[in-house]
Amino acid sequence: MSKESFDPFKMAQRQFDAVAEKLGLDGPTKELLRWPDREYHFNIPIRMDDGTYKVFRGYRCQHNDSRGPCKGGIRFHPLETIDTVRALSMWMTWKTAVVDIPLGGGKGGVICDPHNLSMREQEAICRGWVRQMAGDVGPDRDIPAPDVMTTGQHMLWMLDELEKITGQKQPGFITGKPIGMGGSLGRTEATGYGTIYTLRESLIELGIDIKGTTMSVQGFGNVAQYAIELYTQYGGTVVCVSSWDHKEQKSFSFRKAAGISLDEMLAITNRFGEIDREKAKGLGYEVLGGDKWIEQETDILLPAALENQINAETALKINDSVRIIVEGANGPTTPEADEIIKEKNIWMIPDFLANAGGVTCSYFEQVQCNMNYFWTKEEVLGKLDEKMTHAYGSVSNLARSRNIYMRDAAYMIAISRVAEACKMRGWV
Ligand code: NAD
């Protein structure tokens, strides 16, 4: 399936429809939950460094806020589409529900390529995004966060713009802020570490010692880097990582059978998570085609790049050695690939459970901002581990007791919670 023909929103709706059917949801509840409650499409005109003007397209989708204010990242990506934002906002609703935090689901994006934008131009886009959305976001309505190609700096510009508009300090409006500027310790690590907390629990259940295991990872950005850090601290070995090369417009995989060194790799990786091929070769890494990460003979696969990476075509290449797939990215696996994974009897830790560490820590950040009192990193990560372990346990218990696929079990828990909230509010 090519990038052009893949529609993540149709996939998110198909996943929802299948579970709604199993849960026996009534018609109005289904209709309500298969679309965002609200969506915003807008222009962001900015003056470029060369004095010309350029108009960027911005989006925000607020999928559902029955359990609390909407929550979700803002992506900067040249291939961003409204359907990607819709899908991601829906997955955020399920994500906040499955880890049982009092928030709903939202997502935003801007069609732009930060590789070709100066920091001043990116700041102008951030401020322009907030000017368009100022009336409909805020700590009690919708709380953005960083996502692909946006960082704490982008969040701080957005916060500053909202505070200028409202004339009030509102640190709880946005999360993922830099430390010392309202950010929470542990937020940078949270998503990657969260995936490994769930992986650790699954290995305990399967009776496998994490120490002897191997993993192959797609992507080498925020999620992948911290997942690799904790996994290797636990004694696991990462034998392959892959990353995008924006000059070549394709991805590459980097393999070292003895295990990659995180520090070595970080030293040759740019701020977009792109690994320098020539330097990697110099350090003894084998440089392979971008899709080779999935074919590796490992126990674990961690897709941590983009959606639609494990599809009907690539899933067939998964090595028979693979026991667990833990989804760091959002929507990396298509429903067709899920069928192949079920046949291969691979234990799946689905995206909105596995990568919920980020939003959980964002929730902690908001709580700390609202009370203006900040926890230590140990406290944050301890609470995160507890939340993720508990959520993993609930999903896995349901999957095992009903003999259902983990993704279906996670959906059943999340969708029932949201459907119940909508019912209790009298919406449907
Ligand atoms: P990032 O921008 O820091 O890193 C993305 C990485 O993927 C980079 O290393 C890039 O080179 C690589 N990449 C991009 N396209 C690729 C391709 N086709 N093949 C191989 N590698 C490719 O992004 P991130 O924050 O690490 O997010 C990664 C995924 O995790 C996304 O799906 C995101 O939505 C999801 N996610 C992120 C967070 C978070 O807190 N950062 C939370 C939840 C989910």
Image (cartoon, grey):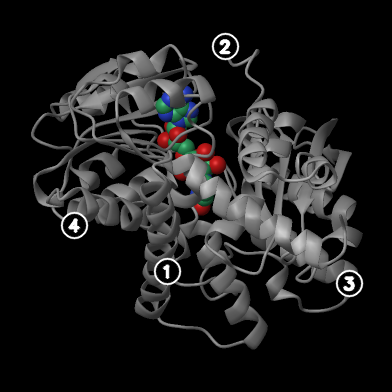
Q: Residue at x 80, y 39 (%)?
A: 58
Q: Which mark is residue 417?
A: none
Mark 1, secondary structure of its residue:
helix
Distance from the alpha carbon under mark 1 to that under mark 3: 32 Å
The location of residue 27, given as percent across then percent down, is 82, 41
Mark 1 or 3, nearer chain start: 3
Mark 2 or 3, nearer chain start: 2
Q: Viewer-nearest of labels 3 and 4?
A: 4
Q: How many marks?
A: 4
Mark 3 or 4, nearer chain start: 3
Instruction: Quarter of the image for the N terminus: give it.
Output: top right
Distance from the alpha carbon under mark 3 to that under mark 4: 45 Å
The location of residue 226, given as percent across then percent down, is 34, 52
Instruction: Quarter of the image for the C terminus: give it.
Output: bottom right
**Is 20 left or right of 398, judged from the image as shown?**
right
Mark 2, secondary structure of its residue:
loop
Q: Give the labeled residue for mark 4.
A: 233
Indicate the quadrant where residue 383 lies: bottom left
**Is 41 left or right of 16, judged from the image as shown?**
right
- Say what amino acid the circle numbered 3 marks: Thr
Q: Give the labeled residue for mark 3.
A: 166
Asked whether the residues under the numbered discs 2 and 3 touch, taking CB atoms below 8 Å apart as contact, a structural biologist would say no
The location of residue 186, given as percent across then percent down, is 42, 67
Q: Residue at x 23, y 30 (%)?
A: 322
Q: Viewer-nearest of labels 1 and 3?
A: 1
